[in-house]
Amino acid sequence: MVYHVNGRRIAENAHCTNRADAVRLLKKRTGDAATGKPVGPELDRTNLDELLAMVEADYRANSRRSLDRVQQAAAHLRDFFRGNRKARDITSDGITRYAAHRLEDGAKASTANYEMAVLRRGFRLGLRAGKVGTRPEFSMLQVSNVRSGFFESEQYRSVVAHLPNYLKPVAQAAYITGWRTKSELLTRQWRHVDLTSGWLRLDPGETKNGDGRMFPLTPDLREILEEQRERVREIGKATGQIVPWIFCHSGGSRIKDFRGAWAKACKDAGVPGRLVHDFRRTAVRNLERASVPRSAAMKLTGHKTEAVYRRYAITDSAMLQEAAVKLAVLHAAEAGSGEKRKSGAKVSALAGEK
């Protein structure tokens, strides 16, 4: 087939043995070219590796924090489809079979959805770059694994008591602020703390949504940070270095991963399988219990939309009991007002008779 796109002559093998089929394909190519759709033999050469490479490059260019997770998803996709698999041969049916395969391997539905989303992103970037002509349909799996875990006060204190000393302040700060532990608390340096004005700060670009954030130092949080400052100073003196991190190991290095110590502390505290992220839900619930206005609470915890915040605003039995007490007080006040109105009406009637 020979056709022209923007004045450029393109010769393409139709891969047909029947002239009528080749003519139909040629008409499709010229029609696509006329409407501005990408056409050309390079569309048939693009493979899965190229699509996934574009996704990784996009994440690097935008400094996204979840590049490592994208790479893990890409490894699973390459293993199933083969990296040299042509993009045009990846169909909606094949994507559905991939999801079923991942579930059989023990992956959760949310994990399979994330991996399919990476592939979908690759096709979108391919379309934008003119390297693929079409994008298959993606049917995401239904996910019903939204967690509702949170810590009661005694559970929180028990877990903290079983944590190593260097991790106790991390858990305490997470319980109060509800900030993301790995990306928002463990990355804090002393330059982010203003003990004089009373703020703990996240600069713009450091958060998941890109916005900056500030948390006022409550008495408990101030005490935690002041004690931690003395501890870090002692570490600096002992090691002969300036330690910039608020939360660090005994040698002054930043804490990056404590999954093993956390799992052991939860098991010893009698709450095995709990997540550090449960502190985020707990903080939201505590703000709701304290009747903090939702707009202010969202600013403190960093929830950009109320829809997401509501997922974390867990209503438990204690909150329902508190609501019942408030409702009873309201009903009692209404009843009292009604009695006063009746008494006032009787007095007015008697005065009228006289």
Image: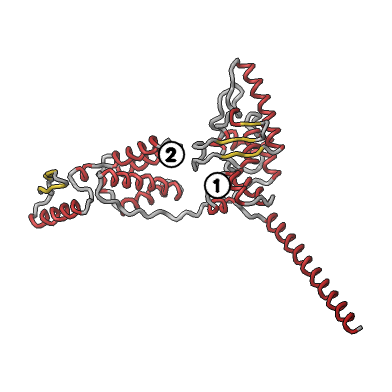
Task: Name the front one of labels 1 and 2.
Answer: 1
Residue 110 appearing in the image = yes
Q: Position of residue 146 (x, y in %)?
A: 53, 52
Q: Crowding at label 1, few (<14), some or many (≥20) Cα neighbours within 10 Å? A: some
Using the rendered view, name the quadrant where residue 230 is placed.
top right
Circle 1 sits on which residue? 303
The single residue placed furthest to the top in the displayed view is 240
Scheme by which the image is coloured? secondary structure
Q: Position of residue 270 (x, y in %)?
A: 66, 42
Using the rendered view, name the quadrant where residue 162 is placed.
top right
Q: Foreground residue, 256 or 103? A: 256
Using the rendered view, name the quadrant where residue 252 is placed.
top right
Which quadrant is the C terminus positioned in? bottom right
Disc 1 is placed on an element classified as loop
Residue 192 left/right relative to 155: left
Check if mark 1's residue and mark 2's residue have beta carbons within 8 Å: no
Of label 1 and label 2, which has the lower sequence position?
A: 2
**Relative to 161, does residue 238 appear above or below in the rendering?**
above
Disc 2 is placed on an element classified as helix
Residue 186 left/right relative to 234: left
**Relative to 233, does residue 341 appear above or below in the rendering?**
below
Q: Of the residues shown, which amino acid type is indicated by label 1?
A: His
Quote the CA–CA distance across marks 1 and 2: 22 Å
Tell me the number on the disc at residue 69.
2
**Relative to 313, does residue 161 appear above or below in the rendering?**
above
Q: Position of residue 254 (x, y in %)?
A: 56, 27
Q: Of the residues shown, which amino acid type is indicated by label 2?
A: Arg
